Amino acid sequence: MDAAGAGASMSPAQVRAVFDDDRLWQVGVYVQAGSEQVAWQFAAVLPGLVDAASPDGRLVPVSELEALLEAASVTGARSVGPQKH
């Protein structure tokens, strides 16, 4: 955690150290993006996800997380990396 209590940032290289290339490729196929974009997006969202899943250092019950993920998936929104202009 940083001084404010939020999780530390991650780099795409750190994501690749956690998730193997095949897993990133599989996610990329699902979201129609390259594995590098997937690693970038994971690096951007994982620290916030961990913070949200553990407010005040306590884990949120799985049932609550499942409900939140289901609600988020209904929108069908898929963000994949930096937007190209």
Image (tube, grey):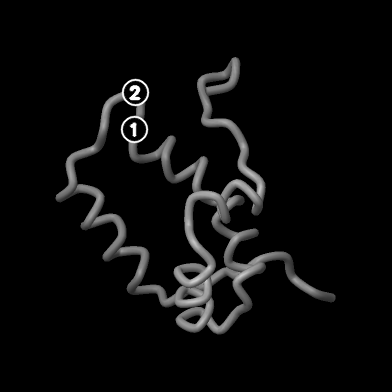
Residue 9 versus residue 63 in the image, above or below: above
What type is the residue that disc 2 sits on?
Answer: Gly
What type is the residue that disc 1 sits on?
Answer: Ser
Residue 11: where, in percent of width, then height?
66, 46
Q: Residue at x 29, y 55 (%)?
A: 68
Query: Viewed as shown, does residue 54 lie left or right of 76?
Result: left
Residue 29: where, in percent of width, then height?
50, 83
Q: Quadrant of residue 61?
A: top left
Q: Residue at x 35, y 22 (%)?
A: 56
Nearer to us in this view, 69 or 22: 22
The residue where tag 2 is placed is 57
Q: Mark 1 falls on what kind of element?
A: loop
The residue where tag 1 is placed is 54
Residue 57: where, in percent of width, then height?
34, 23
Q: Quadrant of residue 59?
A: top left
Q: Residue furthest right?
A: 85
Q: Where's the C terminus, which quadrant?
A: bottom right
Query: Viewed as shown, does residue 41 lie left or right of 26?
Result: right
Q: Residue furthest left?
A: 63
Q: What's the distance in space between the residues labelled 1 and 2, CA to CA?
A: 5 Å
Q: Residue at x 48, y 57 (%)?
A: 19
**Disc 1: CA contacts within 10 A as few (<14), some (14-19) or many (>=20):** few
Q: Are marks 1 and 2 in contact (CB under 8 Å)?
A: yes
